[in-house]
Image (cartoon, rainbow, N blue to C red):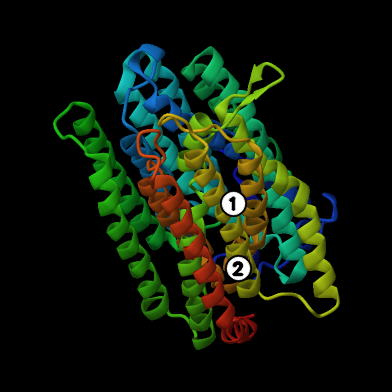
Amino acid sequence: MPPDNRSAFTQPQAAQLAHDEPPAGLEHITGDRGFFGQPRGLATLFFTEMWERFSYYGIRPLLVLFMTAALARGGFGFDRPTASAIVGIYAASVYLASLPGGWIADRWLGLQRGIWWGGVFIALGHLSIGLSAVFAHQAFFLGLALIVMGTGLLKPNISALVGQLYPEGGSRRDAGFSIFYMGINTGALIAPIITGYLGERVGWHWGFGAAGLGMLLGLLTYRARAAGTLGPLGAQPAGDASDQRKARAITLGVLGVIVVAVLLVAAGVFTIDPLSLANSMKNIILGMAAIGFIYLFFFAGLTGTERKGIVVILVLFCFSVVFWSAFEQAPTSLNLFMRDFTNRTVGGFEIPTTWMQSVNSVFVIALAPVLGMIWLRLGQRGRDLSSPAKFSLGLAFAGVGFLVMVFAANRVISGGTAGAAMRVSMWWLVASYFFQSIGELALSPVGMSSMTKLAPRRFAGLTMGVWFTSIALGNLIAGIVGGNVDPEKLEQMPALFQRTAMSLFIAAAVLAVLIIPIRNMMRERE
């Protein structure tokens, strides 16, 4: 358990933190500028998130390669659509778990303890995957389930806590989220290089184990720094004692059901078809998102102004799904394209497939300060782009990235001989990731920041969970379509990338039309 900061509360502070009011008496935390002009609490959350993302992105690109590898090479020997669907289900579940994870922190644990226990579950998940070298499939899938539950607790609450470091809002908050996003991408940059090399060249479980070590480093960082840099911020849940008892009972009950279900599947009592499950999950996720929005809009006791904020969140949610269904093809379709259709040899050294997954992070780290400075300068001149305008730009740039892949896929088909596909330069993928990265920077950190601006404070964790639900749905769609990159079915590739590009361009155009009304509603809410 992390340092218990509840003893640091005065009664007035505790009462304020439990209601929809900005916390008072915490200017020494929120007004601090000891981390590149930002609060030192941001550094704590930056490094915790960096190592958590190291663990997540460390195993993510290995999953489809490991599961499609032949049994003789230590893999599971799954076909591509099945493996891709499993990756989609796993990634979708990671983000979908943010919805109950945010609610649990709001009503029971508080943001700080939600982050801690999330990290503990993730570390246990990696340990279980490491043991799958002995216990095979059962330990592997149990480990994925534990990571899903842990990330659901950690991911929305660490983002919500970043937002609480900036009660004044404004462009400084956007800049803070851009820095925080650099932490995410630092972990995502380092992870595939280390875990990919170990997994592909030494042994799959060496790569999985290295990813787990990253989460342990994140837990140690959080425990060492939280008390001094975050203080009581986010330590108290919004619910009263009765709410906490109810939330605890519901959470433990659902956890028990999950444990029983996992044991029954592991024992072979039930079998699961990943493709059918993935398609069914689309409806389940949409239904859960609808329930979340209906609850917030009609039954959460919000004011009229707060309801307008929920309407904007709903609009951004829909366009976020479109973006992430394209962007999250990185570990599936683009990863398989890298392995099967690119020339990966440089100076006699064959680059591991997973290393291409770091290119996006290189671009994000290089460009994040540039875009952060652009947002700040525009804000200082009174010409800051609204969140929907940045969203529209993000969708358009991602569309260009997939348009590049249409040309690359056509070149693979047309340049082959005697029925064999041609291997193209890796620069096609690099160019695609360049445009996708600009799109990501224009949309993702701004999306997280918008959620913290628009969300009622007492529902900060739940609202951030709604945001991550859009990413869950995008990941699931990406997993369903991501198996359509196959040397035996070359004609599917250009069609896949073309559909993806057109969806992004159409979404960008529609959102551009809606910029003015959405911007007006956001201004009224703020």
Residue 51's quadrant in the figure?
top right
Say left or right for 139 vs 457: left
Q: Which amino acid, by three-letter code, is at mark 1?
A: Val
Residue assigned mark 1: 404
Return the residue found at the far front: 418
Label 2: which secondary element: helix
- Residue at 62% in and 48% down: 432
Please say if the residues under marks 2 and 1 sit with CB atoms less than 8 Å apart. Answer: no
Label 1: which secondary element: helix
Rounded to the nearest whole Å, what is the CA distance between mark 2 and mark 1?
Answer: 20 Å
Residue 392's quadrant in the figure?
bottom right
Res 308 label: none
Q: Name the quadrant of the C terminus.
A: bottom right
- Residue 65: x and y in percent read 44, 28
Say left or right for 173 vs 343: right
- Residue 258: x and y in percent read 28, 41
Viewer-proximal residue, 332 or 388? Answer: 332
Res 391 label: 2
Viewer-proximal residue, 21 or 501? Answer: 501
